[in-house]
Image (spheres, helix red, strand yellow):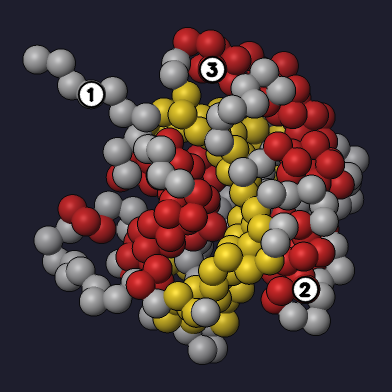
């Protein structure tokens, strides 16, 4: 008996040894949402704590070989790019993407791993903005990451416009407030705000939350969801995964990406996409 082939998401990101973020988060998220993840390691991390982790980029030729092997032999439906490891790796990814202009591209640059003093990484924000943003369907950016790319505006809307001026088609801004136990996200395109969402979350900060959100958007796009629907469903998935998070180590809980298979978890009454802010 034959079975339907799951949509394939190609993920280029860092290998986090804790298994909480990076490629492991992408693999779990894709599998949980009915996709297959083809993981390409762009860099290796020494610990599961971004602030203290040593990050070593993978050789560019190996990244190119891995990515092209997947793209030429598997039917990839979407591409997710996380931390690229070096400017040379960004340039290589850009070259690869030129041959696949119709594949959805979802980016989260993961600048928490960026070392501005490393010669291989020093100009990464500029390289991502100039080479990857114009090709991306959407970028998912925290306020910390935005501040490394542009001068943030006085308002959420002004900040979104500043980042869109770098050539992005759409951006999902995320801002968390641990003291108020909430997240605010805003989906924008060149015409302005599409939709804003408020998350009220018992666990407002998790190790691997942004990786989960970005990979979930990629997975829903791989299932041919329109972009806004993919963003909304990905937020619902991430919200539930964070609500069911495990305390595994490294000081932060980790999203439970297979929450739906846990009989001890009750389904919530409301989720972020059910409570948009107009």
Marks 1 and 2 sit apart, C-alpha to C-alpha, by: 45 Å
Q: Provide residue 42's location: percent of width, then percent of height.
A: 64, 33
Q: Which of marks 2 and 3 precedes in the sequence? A: 3
User: Is residue 52 among the parts visible in the rendering?
Assistant: no
Task: Pick out the residue farthest to the front.
Answer: 191
Q: Residue at x 64, y 62 (%)?
A: 188
Q: Are marks 1 and 3 in contact (CB under 8 Å)?
A: no
SS at circle 1: loop
The image quadrant of residue 148 is bottom right
User: Is residue 130 among the parts visible in the rendering?
Assistant: yes
Q: Are marks 1 and 2 in contact (CB under 8 Å)?
A: no
97 versus 247 height, above or below = above
Q: Provide residue 241's location: percent of width, then percent of height.
A: 35, 61
Closer to viewer: mark 3 or mark 2: 2
What is the crowding at mark 3: few (fewer than 14 residues within 10 Å), some, or many (at least 20)?
Answer: some
249 and 128: which is toward the camera: 128
237 vs 68, left or right, is: left
The image quadrant of residue 219 is top left
Q: Residue at x 73, y 49 (%)?
A: 168
249 vs 178, left or right, is: left
What is the crowding at mark 1: few (fewer than 14 residues within 10 Å), some, or many (at least 20)?
Answer: few
Marks 3 and 2 sit apart, C-alpha to C-alpha, by: 38 Å
SS at circle 2: helix
Marks 1 and 3 sit apart, C-alpha to C-alpha, by: 19 Å
Q: Residue under label 2, please give it.
A: 158
SS at circle 3: helix
181 versus 108 height, above or below = below
Instruction: Report the disc number at residue 71.
Output: 3
Q: Residue under label 1, please give it.
A: 4
């Amino acid at each position: 008996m034959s079975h339907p082939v799951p949509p394939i998401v190609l993920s280029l990101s860092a290998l986090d040894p804790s298994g909480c973020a990076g490629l492991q988060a992408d693999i779990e998220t894709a599998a949980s949402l009915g996709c297959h993840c083809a993981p390409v390691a762009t860099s290796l991390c020494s610990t599961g704590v971004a602030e203290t982790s040593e990050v070593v980029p993978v050789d560019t030729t190996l990244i190119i070989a891995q990515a092209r092997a997947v793209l030429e032999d598997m039917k990839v439906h979407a591409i997710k790019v996380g931390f690229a490891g070096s400017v040379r790796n960004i340039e290589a990814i850009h070259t690869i993407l030129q041959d696949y202009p119709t594949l959805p591209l979802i980016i989260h640059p993961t600048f928490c791993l960026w070392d501005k003093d490393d010669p291989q990484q020093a100009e990464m924000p500029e390289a991502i903005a100039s080479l990857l943003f114009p090709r991306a369907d959407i970028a998912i950016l925290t306020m910390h990451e935005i501040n490394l790319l542009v001068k943030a505006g006085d308002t959420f809307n002004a900040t979104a416009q500043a980042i869109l001026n770098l050539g992005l088609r759409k951006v999902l801004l995320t801002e968390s407030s641990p003291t108020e136990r909430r997240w605010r996200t805003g989906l924008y395109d060149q015409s302005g705000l599409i939709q804003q969402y408020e998350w009220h979350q018992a666990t407002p900060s998790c190790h691997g939350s942004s990786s989960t959100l970005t990979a979930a958007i990629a997975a829903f796009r791989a299932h041919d969801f329109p972009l806004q629907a993919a963003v909304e469903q990905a937020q619902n998935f991430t919200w539930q995964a964070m609500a069911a998070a495990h305390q595994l180590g490294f000081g932060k809980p980790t999203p439970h990406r297979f929450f739906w298979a846990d009989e001890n978890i009750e389904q919530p009454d409301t989720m972020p996409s059910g409570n948009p802010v107009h």
